[in-house]
Image: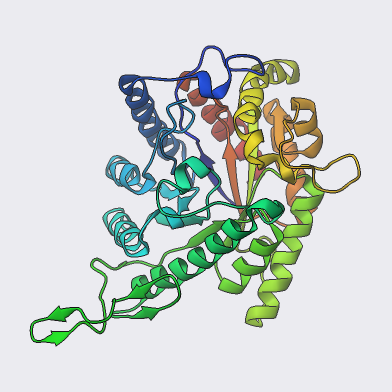
Amino acid sequence: MRTGVFLFGGVEMGDAGAGPPAPTDRRYDAKTMWAATERILETGVLCDRLGFDSFWLTEHHFQYEGYEVVPNGLMIGAILAERTEQIRIGTMFNIVGQWHPLRLAEDFATLHNISRGRAILGIGRGTVPREAESLGTMIGSFDNPEKADADEYNRKQFAEAVDVIRLALDNESFAYHGEVYDLPPPGIPDRGGQVEQLSLVPRPLYPYEIWQAITSPPTLEAVPRGGWGGVMWLKHHTFVKQFWDRFADVYEEAHGQALAPGEKRTLVVNTCVADTHEEAIASVRDGHDEFWKFLGPYGWSRGYMGPDGRPSAPGLIPTLEESLENKVWLVGTVDDVAAGIDWYRDHLGGVENLVVFPAMLGDPYDKVDDQLHRLAEGVLPQLA
């Protein structure tokens, strides 16, 4: 089982928790933001030294609140590649509609080559209107009828952009003519002729993986048909199982090949480890509550189970007890957390790719370092 680490990468907050201040009342200066970026890089180096397989950054923009301070995981990833030896480097996720697809392809290929094949291409459609609509796309949700037009456009733009990215990365030359992207545009003069094809420079020198967030039924149908991997996070364990199995069924229908247990699927679990269960609960509560205070209004908790056994309504802000019941958070001693991961391996019929989310919003980075040591030295050896 390959095990990675995923960080939002925010600033340290001494007042994290369920109460005030409201997320939008926070504002951090440039020096504080950059200090967090430096600590994120140091954390990636520590993950490499501790033997984790992968380290995952984010792409978020304009977050003066200090929750996620990395706008370009590929650029930060290139710095990290120069400071590390073996760890693979990805972004959960590059928000495709916020890039020109050819710039994303170029930058990914650069990171992949300079890291000697250690880059992972994470792709997503986005969640934050402030970012999306300022950077060239729109954001909707399949379960929000008022945003149906935005969701339809986002899906169309995303699908075409991914087609462009794959053509550019995998072919010596290419052209693409769709509804959103027309590449190269017609009529470009070049040395007495017209441009008919484009060639990406650089292109990857090594095989690469693509992984996409799967949060909705439409995406669950699209990703396995596309042939790349799916990442599942923040869902009640029964919903994870349903998505996990459906992914394998759709992949086999589309490609005529059965997946091995856990193949092409990544499970993300939030963790907190302490000497006792009670200490772990106390340690994680404020960061958990800050997490949902920030992300609940964006609909991130709709993968939780509601009282009727169906997905909860968007906007739910779960308690820590609800997160533990959903098994979205695994909290306790090293033995408790190892047992929780083992439970998921049995529940899902096998997990090849596990990513842990060990840093709650606002956590001091010294605490994050401690969590990584506890995971690498206490939890993972039990899972070998």
Residue 211: x and y, percent? 52, 59
Q: Quadrant of residue 272?
A: top right
- Whole-percent x and y of residue 154? 53, 60
Q: Answer with left or right where residue 226 lies relative to residue 164.
A: right
Q: Nearer the viewer, residue 146 or 213?
A: 146
Q: Look at 13% across and 87% down and name the residue there.
A: 193
Where residue 277 sits in the image (x, y, percent)? 74, 21
Looking at the image, can residue 182 be seen?
yes
Q: Is residue 29 above or below residue 250?
A: above
Name, please, the residue furthest toward the right: 308
Q: Residue at x 43, y 20 (%)?
A: 27
For the view shown, which residue lies furthest in the left direction?
191
**Which residue is located at x 58 percent, y 20 percent?**
22
Q: Is residue 35 left or right of residue 340?
A: left
Q: Residue 339 lies in what quarter of the image?
A: top right
Q: Is residue 315 left or right of residue 369?
A: right
| Number of marks in the rendered image | 0
Residue drawn at the location 37% of the way across and 35% of the way down: 45
Q: Position of residue 3 (x, y in %)?
A: 56, 46
**Does 17 appear above or below 147?**
above
Vertical arrangement, residue 300 with respect to residue 30, above or below: below
- As rendered, which of 331 and 299 lies closer to the eye? 299
In this view of the protein, can residue 362 be seen by the observer? no
Give the image's coloring scheme: rainbow
Residue 112 drawn above or below residue 288: below
